[in-house]
Image: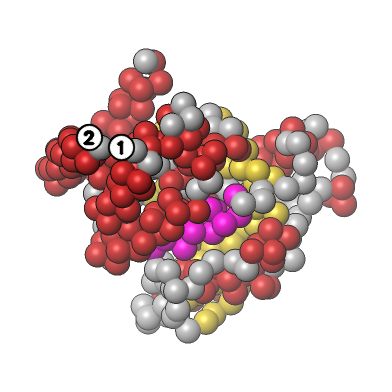
């Protein structure tokens, strides 16, 4: 199907949602990126989440006039801003754009074109993306591995690199599952994706469609302690909700080995609490305490090396190393 071969009334409407707090540096560029989409049956919703920058964010948003729908609310966090947009949106599909990120011009078109290839209407599309710090033209691509929808929940738990702004979500799914959890400050996205995956099939298309900006003022950076606590709690919850079939599929139908693999992934990423929880489940399913201790020691050592590299390398260098590592893994 070619999008340009259909009349506008035949195409689903897509709501691009841009939550923003003190976004004067990047907001105009993000809105222009949304307006430049080749897919035209769109609405663009900007939600000002109580910015306190002397009106700069508001002035930028209002400069686009009727080209966007603009809402202002008291500050409550990104989840609350997204939920306001979900209540107000008129589209059949929801597409989140962070105020500091960009879309490729064909992001929405490519994802709408991918929908007929899915097996049913209960489908969420996601894609690959670029990461950049200053200049989008020097961005590093992040190519995700091809994961079957049946293995998506394990992948999300064990360290996926899914970027929420690459998703295209049916609006009915957000209504059904209640939107984002406003009590979460940094993990509201992964919490919702995991809940949605109970019913909806997450389909990956291997195209780079989003440019994600990495900078020091992002929530995961300046709320690092909150993010660590939330991730430990969230991942422990994910582990608890994985089915026996999910866990067994990780290690050839061996539940103990599956939980040990999950524990190792937690420790390698610095999530001590979630790792201990998965390790206890591994022990309950026959894995010896000595094997768990050895696995933890190796994983923690790997985390320490990665943490040191993050401290001494620039963001651009880290992007390059991640890209090289992913290519090496794909070539094995």
Q: Residues within 10 Å of mark 2 (few under 14, many from 20)?
A: few
Q: Position of residue 272 (x, y in %)?
A: 24, 53
For the point 35% across and 46% down, which residue is it? 284
- The residue that mark 1 highlights is 287
Looking at the picture, tell me which residue is in the foreground, 178 or 258. 258
Using residue 313 as the reference point, say whether residue 144 is left or right of it.
right
Marks 2 and 1, how far apart at CA: 7 Å
Using residue 280 as the reference point, say whether residue 175 is left or right of it.
right
Q: Is residue 86 above or below residue 75?
A: above
Q: Position of residue 177 (x, y in %)?
A: 64, 64
Looking at the picture, tell me which residue is in the foreground, 57 or 167. 167
Q: Position of residue 273 (x, y in %)?
A: 27, 56
Q: Main secondary structure of the magenta part?
A: helix
- The residue that mark 2 highlights is 291
Question: Is residue 122 within the magenta segment?
Answer: no
Number of numbered labels in the structure image: 2
Residue 136 seen from this side = no
Using residue 118 as the reference point, say whether residue 31 is left or right of it.
left
Could you tell me which secondary element the residue under label 2 belongs to?
A: helix
Residue placed farthest to the bottom in the image?
A: 74
For the point 77% across and 46% down, which residue is it? 121
Q: Is residue 270 above or below residue 139?
A: below
Could you tell me which secondary element the residue under label 1 belongs to?
A: loop
For the point 14% across and 42% down, which residue is it? 304
Q: Circles 2 and 1: CB distance less than 8 Å?
A: yes
Q: Position of residue 321 (x, y in %)?
A: 26, 31
Quarter of the image with the C terminus in it: top left
Residue 23 seen from this side = yes
- Part of the protein shown in magenta: 186-197
Quarter of the image with the N terminus in it: top right
Q: Is residue 95 above or below residue 279?
A: below
Looking at the picture, tell me which residue is in the foreground, 198 or 303. 198
């Amino acid at each position: 199907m070619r999008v340009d071969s259909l009349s506008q009334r035949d195409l689903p409407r897509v709501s691009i949602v841009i939550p923003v707090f003190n976004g004067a540096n990047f907001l105009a560029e993000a809105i222009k990126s949304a307006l430049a989409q080749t897919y035209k049956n769109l609405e663009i919703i900007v939600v000002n989440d109580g910015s306190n920058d002397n009106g700069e964010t508001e002035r930028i948003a209002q400069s686009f006039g009727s080209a966007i729908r603009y809402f202002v609310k008291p500050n409550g966090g990104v989840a609350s801003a997204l939920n306001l947009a979900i209540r107000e949106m008129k589209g059949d599909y929801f597409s989140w754009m962070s105020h500091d990120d960009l879309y490729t011009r064909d992001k929405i078109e490519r994802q709408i074109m991918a929908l007929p290839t899915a097996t049913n209407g209960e489908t969420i599309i996601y894609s690959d993306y670029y990461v950049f710090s200053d200049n989008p033209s020097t961005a590093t691509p992040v190519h995700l591995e091809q994961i079957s929808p049946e293995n998506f929940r394990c992948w999300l738990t064990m360290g996926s690199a899914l970027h929420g702004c690459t998703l295209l979500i049916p609006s009915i799914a957000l209504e059904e599952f209640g939107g984002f959890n406003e009590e979460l400050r940094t993990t509201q996205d992964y919490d919702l994706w995991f809940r949605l995956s109970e019913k909806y099939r997450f389909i990956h298309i291997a195209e780079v469609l989003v440019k994600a900006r990495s900078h020091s003022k992002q929530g995961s950076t300046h709320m690092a302690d909150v993010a660590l606590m939330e991730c430990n709690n969230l991942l422990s919850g994910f582990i608890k909700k994985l089915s026996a079939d999910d866990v067994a599929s990780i290690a050839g139908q061996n539940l103990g080995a599956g939980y040990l693999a999950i524990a190792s992934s937690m420790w390698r990423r610095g999530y001590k609490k979630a790792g201990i929880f998965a390790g206890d489940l591994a022990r309950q399913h026959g894995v010896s305490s000595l094997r768990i201790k050895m696995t933890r020691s190796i994983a923690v050592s790997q985390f320490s090396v990665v943490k040191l590299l993050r401290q001494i390398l620039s963001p651009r260098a880290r992007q390059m190393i991640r890209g090289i590592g992913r290519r090496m893994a794909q070539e094995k």
